[in-house]
Image (spheres, rainbow, N blue to C red):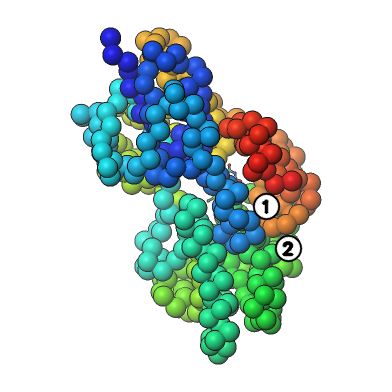
């Protein structure tokens, strides 16, 4: 009998952890496991706000996929997924095709623009190593450009759309980085402005109000200006236009205002809500016994508040761990061993730049250097999960 084909799309948190667990749990003659990813490296998305601002080199936030997998057990294919044909059980790649018996979709998210005109074309987003390298280079270029056109103060204006988790983490890093660039380019720091714009009535919607106040205080002291309850209507090559008609000219606009699932999933004819698949208790796509979805592409409702769990790395890792058990059960034809997925939210910590953070761990609120230390521990824990002590020593920031 030929081996069953398990095909994993996307080598982020969901995909890598699924592949690593499967390579240990399944015997080599039980299944052929293949992982497809756009790049030959895995990136640590939760750290990308740092290389985007230039406070960390992007190489620290990526790891070669071949260093993470046992390539005798998992075939790694570096390619881009183009489409999924659920009827023929085939996946079209840019440079080939893959067949599957069991498919895992872990392709991550795409920026959600909420229909704001010009956002896609004119704003940067923090979503990959390539995108953050581009942002960092652009920021430096704006300083260099300003030195040659000193009347253009808008070159030194940085608009960050969205004061959610990613937006807040990014402005914290940017506020640390810009004074250094002022020194390097002989620019008066008074000329530089970071404006963080949020449509919701509060920054960090969903976070504890005391923590939100603390975060905004820290960031204001670092020079960040907030415009809360202020929707952006349009994004142009010169800046943003707010709902009340005010125009803010800025040389750099970074959009962090929301994410949606990957459009490849929507186009595959799988039922989605804003690109995310409302998976069943075993993480299967509705109506498909052979398709599992994890990470940002999956949607799970928190019954306590009747709202979806936010898409986080924590969720992606937990889903991948559960899914690997379920895949072993289906490959072995043991449906009774399928396990229901139960998220266990251990807490959330948001960094506010060097030495500052806020968070909730268990039910306890944490602030300042303790929260910052906790953030580092969380990052190190992930490196340990995927690469043990050697990876912690190689990539960890102490
Ligand atoms: C700046 C920032 C900070 C964050 N901080 C936190 C945090 O502190 N804590 C937390 O829990 N969460 C955090 N998040 C959210 C977290 O990073 C995501 O929820 C998590 O990455 C989702 O994992 P995933 O496996 O679904 O997708 P990803 O990790 O995004 O992986 C998707 C993978 O699929 C690949 N891919 C995409 N399209 C294709 C294609 N067509 N073909 C081939 N490959 C493809 C990508 O290259 C990538 O490798 C943060 C996010 C950002 C942007």
Figure label count = 2
The residue sitting at the right extreme is 369
Where is residue 95, by image quadrant?
Answer: top left
Does 171 sit above or below residue 379?
below
Residue drawn at (69%, 58%), measured in percent from left and top?
Answer: 353
Residue at disc 1, CB closer than 8 Å to ligand 1? yes
For this view, does 10 lie left or right of residue 270? right
Residue at disc 2, CB closer than 8 Å to ligand 1? no
Identify the image quadrant of the N terminus. Answer: top left
Disc 2 on helix, strand or loop? Answer: helix
Residue 217, numbered label = 2
Residue drawn at (37%, 10%), measured in percent from left and top?
Answer: 333
Residue 351, numbered label = 1
**Comparing labels 2 and 1, the label whose residue is closer to the camera:** 1
The residue sitting at the bottom extreme is 151
Does 327 sit above or below residue 118?
above
Q: Residues within 10 Å of mark 1 (few under 14, many from 20)?
A: many
Is residue 316 visible in the rendered image? The answer is no
Residue 126 x, y percent position in the rendering = 50, 56
Residue 329 x, y percent position in the rendering = 43, 14
């Amino acid at each position: 009998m030929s081996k069953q084909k398990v095909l994993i799309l996307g080598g982020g948190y969901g995909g890598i952890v699924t592949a690593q667990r499967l390579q240990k749990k399944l015997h080599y003659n039980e299944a052929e496991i293949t992982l497809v990813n756009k790049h030959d490296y895995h990136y640590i998305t939760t750290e990308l706000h740092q290389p985007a601002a230039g406070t960390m080199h992007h190489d620290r936030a990526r790891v070669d996929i071949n260093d993470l997998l046992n390539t005798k057990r998992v075939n790694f294919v570096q390619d881009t997924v183009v489409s999924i044909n659920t009827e023929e059980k085939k996946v079209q790649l840019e440079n080939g095709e893959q067949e599957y018996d069991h498919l895992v979709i872990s392709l991550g998210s795409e920026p959600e623009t909420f229909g704001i005109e010009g956002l896609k074309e004119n704003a940067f987003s923090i979503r990959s190593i390539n995108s953050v390298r581009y942002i960092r280079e652009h920021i430096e270029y704006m300083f260099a450009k300003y030195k040659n056109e000193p009347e253009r103060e808008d070159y030194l204006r940085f608009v960050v759309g969205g004061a959610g988790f990613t937006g807040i983490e990014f402005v914290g890093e940017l506020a640390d980085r810009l004074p250094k660039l002022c020194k390097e380019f002989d620019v008066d720091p008074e000329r530089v402005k970071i404006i963080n714009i949020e449509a919701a009535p509060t920054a960090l919607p969903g976070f504890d109000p005391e923590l939100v106040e603390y975060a905004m205080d820290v960031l204001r002291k670092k020079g960040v200006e907030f415009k809360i309850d202020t929707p952006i209507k349009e994004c142009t090559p010169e800046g943003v236009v707010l709902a009340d008609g005010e125009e803010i000219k800025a040389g750099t606009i970074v959009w962090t205002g929301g994410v949606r699932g990957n459009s490849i999933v929507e186009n595959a004819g799988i039922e989605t809500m804003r690109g995310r698949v409302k998976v069943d208790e075993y993480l299967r796509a509705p109506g498909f016994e052979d398709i599992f979805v994890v990470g940002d592409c999956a949607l799970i409702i928190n019954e306590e508040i009747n709202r979806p769990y936010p898409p986080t790395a924590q969720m992606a890792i937990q889903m991948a761990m559960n899914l690997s058990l379920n895949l072993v059960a289906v490959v072995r034809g043991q449906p009774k061993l399928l396990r229901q997925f139960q998220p266990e939210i251990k807490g959330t910590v948001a960094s506010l730049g060097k030495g500052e953070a806020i968070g909730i761990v268990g039910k306890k609120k944490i602030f300042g250097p303790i929260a910052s230390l906790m953030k580092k521990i969380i990052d190190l824990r992930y490196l340990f999960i995927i690469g043990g002590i050697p990876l912690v020593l190689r990539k960890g920031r102490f």
